Every structure is written in C-alpha cells, then in structure tokens.
Image: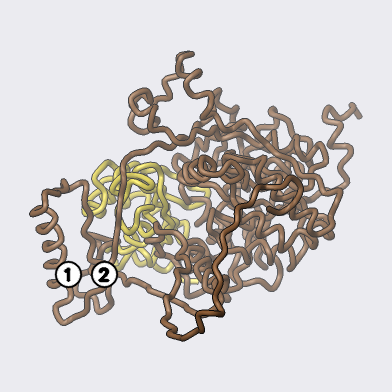
Chain colours: A yellow, B brown
C-alpha cells in the first residue's frame, strides 16, 4: 500500500448538469478501475465534496470506458446563470476529486506505469 | 439480392464520411473552423453556437431589433472561409440561427453575394421556437413541469423569455437531401448536427437504432470541439502544441462504426484517454443517454486506440426514442451583479475579509441587507474552487486570478484579443473557469488634447433626412 492522491491512478473531467455537476473519473488502467469501483463509493465522494456539494451524490458505472461517473446534485450555488460562484459550471470539480488522498495497492500503482 | 429498402444508400458512392466540429460553444475560437477548412480533407463542418442561456440573450436582441437574434459569429466566420469551403465541397451545418434563423439566412446570403458565390444553397430549419405557442399549449393542458424541481410553469409564465424545443437530426438530413450547402438551425440537440449528415449520407431511418446511437456517441465526442483532442485534459503537460490544437473529426461508415481523429500536423492528441475524457463530460446515466432520435447506451461500445491520433468506436447499441421532446425555456429570475478587486499583501486575506465586511456593513446601514444565499464572498487565491478539499499548507496557491489586457489605436485588434480567453476552457489546460462575464470588450480610452482654432473657421448647420427606398438615406 502507498498513500497517494487519486490523480496517480485516474483522470477526471467535470461540467454542469442542471443545478449540480457531473464528475467523470477515468481509471488509468483496468486494475485501477476495479480498485476504484470498490473504494470510490457515493459516500466517500459525498464526504470529500462536503465543502462544495449541498445535495446528494449518485454514481454510474461504465466499465467499457473505465469510467465512474458522479452527479453532485447541488454543487453550483444555483444552476446556470443563477450562480454567483467563480466556478459556476463545476469545471474544476474533477481536479478537486483527483486531490483525494487514499491508500493504493502497489499492484494498482504498477498497473498505471507506462 | 433483395432490393435495398433505402434507395439513398445505393446512390452514395462514399464509404467513409468526414465530419468535423469547429465550434464547441458560443464564444469558442474562430481558429478552430478556419483551420479545419484549410488544413486537411473534410466533407462536413458542424458548428455549435447555442447554450441554454444563449437563447434568452438572443431573444432579447431580437425584441430590440427584429433583424437580430442569431449567432453573428457564424456570419463573420463564413465571410472568412466560405469561398474555400465551397471550393473544397465542404458542407456546413450550424445551429447559428438562434431565435431568428431567417435573419441569419439573410445575413449568410449577403456573404454569398459578396463573394460572388451565387448558386450556394442555404437551408433553414425552423419549428423549435415555441414561445409564441406557449399560452395555447398551456391552455391545451401542457403543464411544462420543471424536470429538476417538479414545479409547474404557470406561476412564472409571465417571466418566460425564450422557449425552444431540442429538435432531432432528421430535419437536418432533409435539408441536405434537398441539396443544401449550408444548413442553419435554431435549437436542436448538439449531436444532431453530426447525426444529420450521417442520416443523409447513409440513408439511415428511425428504425436504424444502433446507427443513430453511434451517431449520437460521435456527436457527443465532437460537440465540445477541442475537449476531445487534448483540451481540458488532466495530464496537460503531456499535450504538445496546445496553441495550434487540432479540432476533432470523425470518419464514419454506414454501419455506424467510426474513428475519431484530427488533421495531420495539428497540435493536441487523439487517444483513448482524450476521447474518454470527453465521453464522460456531462454524461449523466451512461446506459440511458436520451436524444429525440434514439436512447444511446454509452456502456455498450468498444474503444480501440489505433495510434497516430486515431481512436475507433464500434458496437454502439441504441433503444427506441422516448415520445417527448425536451423543451429549453428561460425566464427572468431576478438580477445579479459581481465585481472584483485585487488586494495585495501583507495580510492580503485578512484585509480582503475586512473589505467584504465593510461592504456589507455600509449597505446594511443604508437599508440594503442580503440573505446568505443571496450574496457571494470569494477570496480567489485562497481556495475558492476546491473549498474544503485542497491540501492545507501547500506551497502553491490553490488558485490564481489570471488578468490579461491589451491596448492600442485599433479597436478591432483590441476586441480580437477578448475572443481568445474563454476558449481556453475547452482548449487549454484543465481547471480553467470563472468565465461567466463572457468576452471582455474594448472600451474607449479618453485622451486629452488641448488646441486652438480661429472662430471664423467654424460654421454650424442643421439638416433633416428621410429614408429613400433602394438607396442610402
């Protein structure tokens, strides 16, 4: 096990979806996807975004892409043009998720080394 | 062999069609489509100019001036690329019509005339604008219930400023079937701009669900321009020549299989990872990606990175479309104002906190109080974007405000600068935001120039004009 940040084993892309944001987490390998499918739960993501998201979190799986897709349901301070926030579209929420610290098995870390 | 049920298929000689997207949103860089026309082979150039808020702005412009209400950027672009596009046989499909596609058509025909390209056919797709029919529809029993909140429309009906249906791809295909070189639409789905040409080329029907779903996936990959070719990519340090990033192209076949690529020699990268970045963007439930033409399953397909900036997608599955159109409405929901100050150290953060308290206290003294949810305080540079997330004690600031400016005697040149900031959201490094103010515009610099002139050299006159038909006033 190595203590590291999520960006070591995943990419991310985010944007707005109504009054919330859509955060796609893209595993850097199949082993990373299997590991993240177990540890990156709705509850873990909810806790990570407690300073940003005031609603629920929903997760969808797309194994063909190695993607775990999260909807943060109230993370924009009001949707679209009603938001006063700098990041009114949740464009940076993907990078915020990649800052999550976790214990990553060594074989998962090795699987993403190219 | 039985006769082909779709006679158009037999008419087509091409087995591959090249479709590009040169505009990811209203405000994207003009260089995307200009370079797509110039730098390699292409059959169709699609351009997406519309977002939800755009329709409302355009409606406001049209109310003030009946000849406005469309994306004038499109006309500017055509003035620059139309001769070359027509010479190469590139057809153009754009949702530039906004709430006034006929006025957009008139402006486009003016460009056609200017360049002596008589014979160019411009088609217009209409019917998405339901603002005029809204009351009748509501009297007929339509509640227009808010999909997010569940609220009925009636209490805010009088604040509605635009109402548009997201049309599908078949009207675009019909326009192309009738020989259009340029197709102008109002509100439609973004992927529809890509599916329309595919339906036209391959003769797909409403029953070709897997093909329509494949077109939907292709359209989703293309719809944000350079976001699938290395723009807004997590490993931004690995992307070469982002300044000259290539905008995306799909090479599609009649069975729905397609390859994502970009023109040779352009910057950026097309790889499995850059494409999947975009596939996950605003994806929602991947197994049920709903469009008016088909429900696409984003968990169904295979992705193969073939190298050399080529990624192949195959095996997309689709299910029958739902019986409804999505309606996009905008309504007057109040007012807002945001301003910005820069405060230096020492004690920058403490002084910024004090400054914000001073503002609220003075407003309160004068009778203006704002509830917590009605006001915003952000200390940009002190972890605004990732509140509660970023690592404390980091050497690097959590974010920085980028401030750029230009000046000079040429207004057009100064304005041109402002068009290259917002595009960085989709075609630059990741984590770029805070663009809500839109393009910065040139404002006048007021200079002082004292001088003297003899009184006898000056003579004042007053005259009145009437508009003359067929000539200048």
- How many residues crowd mark 2 within 10 Å: few (<14), some (14–19), many (20+)? few
Q: Chain of mark 2?
A: B
How far separated are the C-alphas under marks 2 and 1? 9 Å
- Measured as percent of width and height from the top left, residue B88 is found at 83, 59
User: What subunit carries mark 1?
Assistant: B
Q: Is residue B379 left or right of residue A40?
A: left
Q: Which residue is mark 2?
A: B341
* Residue at the (25%, 54%) spot, across then down: A48
Q: Which residue: 28% across, 66% down?
A: B340
The answer to which of B105 and A56 lies nearer the viewer is B105
Front: mark 2 or 1: 2
Relative to A9, say whether B364 is above or below.
above
Task: Name the quadrant containing residue B196.
Answer: top right
Q: Can you give x and y, in whole percent of width and height, for residue A102 in the image?
A: 27, 62
Whether label 2 touches label 1, CB < 8 Å: yes
Query: Is any atom of residue A107 visible in this view?
Result: no
């Amino acid at each position: 096990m190595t203590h590291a940040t999520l960006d070591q084993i995943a990419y991310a892309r985010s944007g707005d979806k109504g009054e919330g944001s859509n955060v796609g987490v893209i595993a850097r390998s199949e082993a990373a996807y299997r590991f993240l499918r177990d540890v990156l739960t709705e509850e873990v993501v909810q806790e990570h975004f407690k300073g940003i998201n005031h609603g629920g979190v929903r997760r969808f799986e797309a194994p063909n892409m190695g993607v775990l897709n999260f909807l943060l349901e109230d993370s924009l301070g009001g949707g679209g043009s009603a938001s006063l926030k700098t990041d009114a579209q949740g464009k940076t929420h993907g990078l915020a998720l990649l800052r999550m610290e976790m214990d990553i098995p060594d074989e998962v870390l090795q699987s993403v080394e190219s | 062999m039985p006769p082909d049920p779709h006679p158009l298929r037999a008419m087509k000689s091409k087995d591959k069609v090249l479709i590009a997207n040169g505009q990811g949103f209203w405000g994207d860089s003009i260089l995307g489509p200009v370079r797509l026309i110039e730098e390699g082979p292409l059959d169709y150039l699609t351009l997406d100019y519309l977002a939800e808020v755009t329709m409302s702005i355009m409606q406001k412009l049209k109310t003030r001036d009946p000849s406005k209400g469309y994306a004038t950027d499109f006309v500017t672009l055509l003035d620059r690329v139309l001769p070359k596009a027509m010479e190469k046989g590139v057809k153009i499909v754009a949702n530039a019509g906004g709430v006034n596609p006929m006025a957009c058509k008139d402006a486009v025909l003016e460009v056609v005339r200017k360049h002596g390209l008589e014979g160019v056919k411009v088609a217009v797709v209409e019917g998405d604008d339901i603002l005029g029919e809204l009351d009748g529809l509501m009297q007929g029993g339509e509640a227009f219930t808010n999909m997010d909140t569940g609220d009925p429309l009636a209490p805010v009906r009088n604040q509605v400023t635009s109402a548009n249906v997201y049309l599908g791809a078949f009207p675009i295909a019909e326009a192309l079937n009738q020989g259009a070189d340029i197709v102008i639409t109002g509100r439609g789905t973004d992927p529809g701009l890509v599916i329309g040409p595919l339906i036209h080329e391959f003769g797909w029907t409403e029953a070709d669900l897997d093909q329509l779903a494949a077109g939907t996936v292709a359209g989703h990959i293309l719809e944000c321009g350079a976001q699938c070719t290395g723009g807004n990519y997590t490993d931004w340090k690995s992307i070469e020549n982002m300044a000259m990033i290539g905008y995306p192209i799909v090479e599609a076949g009649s069975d729905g299989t397609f390859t994502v690529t970009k023109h040779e020699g352009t910057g950026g990268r097309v790889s499995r990872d850059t494409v999947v970045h975009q596939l996950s963007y605003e994806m929602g439930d991947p197994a049920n990606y709903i469009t008016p033409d088909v429900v696409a399953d984003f968990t169904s397909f295979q992705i193969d990175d073939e190298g050399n900036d080529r990624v192949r997608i195959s095996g997309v599955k689709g299910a029958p479309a739902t019986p409804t159109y999505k309606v996009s409405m905008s309504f007057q929901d109040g007012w807002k104002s945001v301003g910005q100050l820069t405060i230096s150290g020492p004690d920058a953060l403490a002084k910024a906190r004090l400054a914000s308290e001073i503002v609220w206290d003075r407003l309160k003294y004068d009778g203006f109080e704002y509830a917590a949810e009605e006001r915003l305080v952000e200390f940009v540079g002190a972890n605004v974007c990732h509140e509660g997330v970023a690592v404390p004690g980091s050497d690097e600031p959590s974010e920085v405000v980028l401030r750029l400016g230009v000046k000079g005697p040429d207004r057009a040149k100064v304005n041109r600068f402002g068009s290259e900031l917002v595009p960085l959201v989709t075609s630059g490094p990741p984590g770029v935001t805070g663009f809500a103010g839109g393009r910065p515009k040139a404002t006048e610099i007021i200079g002082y120039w004292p001088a003297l002139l003899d009184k006898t050299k000056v003579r004042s006159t007053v005259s009145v004009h009437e508009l003359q038909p067929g000539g200048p006033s």
